[in-house]
Amino acid sequence: MATQHSRSAARLMMAPAVILLLGWMLVPLTMTLFFSFKRYLPLRGDSLERGLDWVGFENYARFLSSSSFWPSVQATLVIVGGVLVVTVVLGVLLALLLDQPFWGQGIVRILVIAPFFVMPTVSALVWKNMFMDPVNGILAHLWRFFGAEPVSWLSDASLQSIILIVSWQWLPFATLILLTAVQSLDSEQLEAAEMDGAPAFARFGFIILPHLARAITIVILIQTIFLLSIFAEIFVTTGGSFGTRTLTYLIFQRVVDSQNIGLGSAGGVYAIILANIIAIFLMRIVGKNLDR
Amino acid sequence: MARATTTRRKVITTAVAWAIGLLIFFPIYWTILTSFKTEAQAINDPPLFFFFDWTLENYAIVQERSDYMRFLWNSVVLAGGSTLLGILVAVPAAWSMAFVPSKRTKDILLWMLSTKMLPAVGVLYPISLIFVQFNLLDTRIGLVVVLMLINLPIIVWMLYTYFKEIPVEILEAARMDGASLREEILYILTPMAVPGIASTILLNFILAWNEAFWTLNLTAAKAGPLTAFIASYSSPEGLFFAKLSAASTMAIAPILVLGWFSQKQLVRGLTFGAVK
């Protein structure tokens, strides 16, 4: 069906999108790579006009050996891992629950999905002030009601608090995707298993969970990519203190606060490599899906 | 007997599901409720759930103090502009990939997706530098372009998965009946593509509206959208829960309404067609 003529027309139609994305990818990436090999401290008088000193891999080595590097990797892993566990486990349970027949299904679904549409700065600030404030927050009221001492959530349990806020935002996403997957489950198979006397636990482990495996993988991969770069939630709550400085936030501070562009760029290259490792796995799954 | 157990089961499921749904929704509900209280009532212990003097004064104060309308307008321009620009670029691309696929189509699609995974913080300085060079800092046009670029892969992907579902046979039939290319596009393809394009616009408008890395880092007073408006409330001045709530409610209300219409597209759009 496709003629030579329509082929070249097709290429022309694709050109703007391809060129734009190519530029968006290559230009800043090249610049980041360039800066990562340079000594560039604008506050100490380095400037592009006067030329920057080539320092080889010094920035890369210094970024790794700085005392904040490993804690930031740890904070990143704890936050990403924590949110993944919470959202996937609760997401599977919620998806199974919402799949059951009950009154008001549509409304409950809306209630559950709503947090996804709240912008990150709003959810972070609302949680920080109205829920986690150690004096006037709802949680403080609740703690006092039960005679307990209110907790300073964002300083004493900072990582857990961030995990709670971010999980609240991402649970709807996981639930929605897993619910879509649950709904495509063959109910006859489940009924057959039930009639054969398979207990609920076995039905879950041998039929439902394997069926959900692909959807769970996709949820994990996509969320990981977004979670690795969470920014606003930390920016407006702890500002990176109390052990919540993630890799993304550390790079942000190097570039914006301490104005060490070379060091920050080297960190950026690490972040890009990390994201790409995860991206490769996601692409494989999405790519396989394209062939079908 | 069987009937009785299913009804009882349905009652229990209903109770549990509603309890969980309300618990998850509670922070939003509480924010909206608090926005109608006075500052003293907002921090009352025990918390006030319904019986208090409802007031609208927080909304008036927020508008007066931080000029909500300007931020709202910026959000509309940024989200709307970047989405429309993205659609203009993406429709031809997705169209040709869906209807005239070549050997490289799959590679191009995956490559586009990979640009979405570039961590923003890794290119923060280069982009800021380009913005400074071209006087784009704190301008709406600069951010429209950036937001368009970060969402372009998702737009192309969503459109591609929708266009892919349009049966090619119908085109062949029209061609047999002597339809010209123009008629083919205008009368056959467009009506079939409109729902997909509409859902794509909706989801990307939401994503652009809530974007909070570039909007926080590349704007100041002039072009800041609602994400920046809210971030300015992160340093409290005295009693401010009710005002924070009013500001928050105003920032999320428009998108919450749009979001409820986009539930179904959400799954397709954010999993790049891998889950439908």
Image (spheres, grey):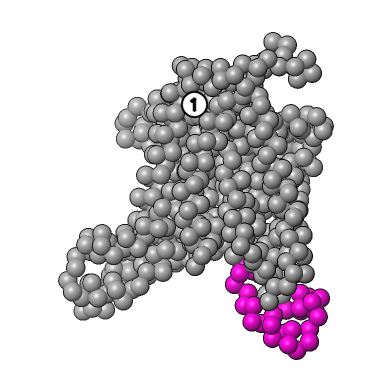
**Res B100 → quadrant:** bottom right
The answer to whether residue B14 is visible is: no
Q: Nearer the viewer, residue A116 or A73?
A: A73
Q: Position of residue A144 (x, y in %)?
A: 36, 32
At numbered mark 1, what does the secondary structure look like: helix, strand or loop?
A: loop
From the viewer's perspective, tell me whether residue A57 is left or right of residue A13: left
* The N terminus of chain A, quarter of image: bottom right
Report the chain holding disc 1. Answer: A
Q: Main secondary structure of the magenta part?
A: helix
* Image-based side of B107 in relation to A73, left or right: right
- Residue with the most extreme bottom position: B177
Task: Tell me if residue B272 is in the magenta stretch.
Answer: no
Q: Position of residue A195 (x, y in %)?
A: 20, 75
At a point 66% along the width and 37% down the height, the residue shown is: B214
Image position of A281 with respect to B273: above or below:
above
Q: Nearer the viewer, residue B60 or A187?
A: A187
Would you say residue B189 is visible in this rendering?
yes
Q: Is residue B105 above or below residue B222?
A: below
Residue carrying label 1: A245
Label 1 neighbourhood size at 10 Å, few (<14), some (14-19), many (20+)?
many
- Front residue of this view, candidates B179 and A141: B179
Q: Residue furthest front?
A: A4
Horizontal and vertical percent for residue A91? 39, 53
Figure quadrant of residue B269: bottom right
What are the residue bounds of the magenta stretch? B162-188
